[in-house]
Image (cartoon, rainbow, N blue to C red):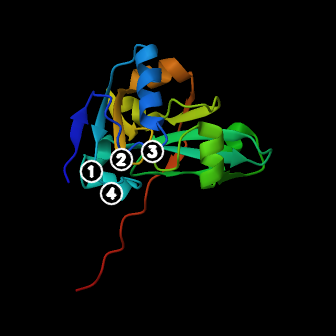
Amino acid sequence: MSPSPSNSADDSVDQGGYGERLRATLSGMHLWHRFIVFDEPVKTVEQAARKVQAEKVAKSIVMIDSNGEPLLAVVPALSFVNHKKLKLLLNVRDVRLANAQEVLQHSGYPAGGVPPINNIKRVLVDQQLLRDETVIVGGGDVNKLLEIRVRDIVTALNPTVADITKNPSPEPRREK
């Protein structure tokens, strides 16, 4: 069940054509990219981390603000979105995670496969991601990941770049 880099148009597991549409979008924008295709669904950071380096992975999280407007938060996979920071930055009363139907409706991609380049125009990128040349993100469907240059994400989306995360708490020490 190992990943295999792919630049082919074989999307037999891409039931909705999402991966192929993403491939066409990226190629049309002349952005360097590399798809990593898996034999099984990769819907969570934990599943991805068994196959690629977790520190290279970022999550594209679709959220809805208190005005009912969608936004996309792109954050390192090992971090969490800080709702308080988002609310202050966006000057909204609240933000919440979008449900699966809202994710597809607003981004154009299914939950678990959302790439940063999608239909959502209000995008926030955590500043930690600027440290690396490339990042691995959702590849359009749950059987693909996408490696893309961070600078291309920033150039293509013109996002707000800010500190929008809280890092996970270290695991509690257990007495022996």
Circle 2 crowding by C-alpha within 10 Å: few under 14, some 14–19, many from 20 = many
At mark 3, the secondary structure is: loop
Q: Is residue 76 visible?
A: yes
Q: Are marks 2 and 1 in contact (CB under 8 Å)?
A: yes
Q: Quadrant of the C terminus?
A: bottom left
Q: Position of residue 44 (x, y in %)?
A: 40, 56
Q: Label 1, on which residue?
A: 39
First along the sequence among labels 4 and 1: 1
The amino acid sitting under disc 2 is: Asn
Separation of disc 2 and disc 1 at Cα?
Answer: 7 Å
**Residue extending furthest toward the bottom:** 176
Residue 15, numbered label: 3
Circle 3 crowding by C-alpha within 10 Å: few under 14, some 14–19, many from 20 = few
Residue 20 falls in which quadrant of the image? top left
The amino acid sitting under disc 4 is: Gln
- The label nearer to you, 3 versus 4, is 3
Q: Are marks 4 and 2 in contact (CB under 8 Å)?
A: no
First along the sequence among labels 3 and 2: 3
Q: Label 4, on which residue?
A: 47
First along the sequence among labels 3 and 4: 3
